[in-house]
Amino acid sequence: MPMRTAPPVETVDFGAPATYRIIVQGTLSPEWSHRFAGMAISSGNQREGEVPRTKLEGRLQDHAELFGVLDGLYGLHLPILLVELVNHPVDKLTDERTAS
């Protein structure tokens, strides 16, 4: 039986701007946006008994800025549940290739 190979993985440029989604446990006011590189901050409606979560989403200039945001959240003792790359210049290249 032939081995399956994984699809090629695009590389991520540490110095390129990209959009990230970060979810933390706890509540963070949208007024803190300026402290987190201007990322949009929203807290979802949680059900009774659920632990509150906050989502930060926005475009960061590079991984150094991402690290600064993560370090700021760590400094506030907010457990980081998710860090997701939402949009990257590589996505545009992939979209252009599939549209051709």
Image (cartoon, rainbow, N blue to C red):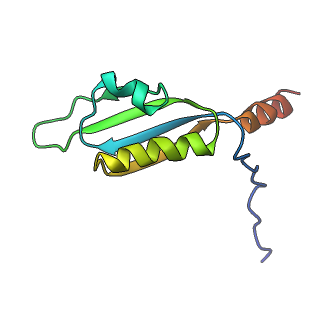
Residue 49 shown left or right of residue 53 in the figure: left
Q: Nearer the viewer, residue 12 or 34?
A: 34
Residue 31 shown left or right of residue 16 in the figure: left
Position of the N terminus, as image quadrant, is bottom right
Residue 86, image x, y percentages = 58, 36
Residue 23, image x, y percentages = 38, 41
- Numbered label tally: 0
Residue 46, image x, y percentages = 20, 34
Q: Residue at x 85, y 33 (%)?
A: 97
Q: Residue at x 68, y 36 (%)?
A: 88
Location of residue 62 by image quarter? top right
Residue 13 shown left or right of residue 44 in the figure: right
Q: Residue furthest bottom?
A: 1
Q: Residue at x 43, y 48 (%)?
A: 71
Q: Residue at x 77, y 73 (%)?
A: 3
Residue 24, image x, y percentages = 34, 44
Q: Nearer the viewer, residue 30 or 100?
A: 30
Position of the C terminus, as image quadrant, is top right
Q: Residue furthest top?
A: 31
37 is higher (above) or lower (below) than 67: above
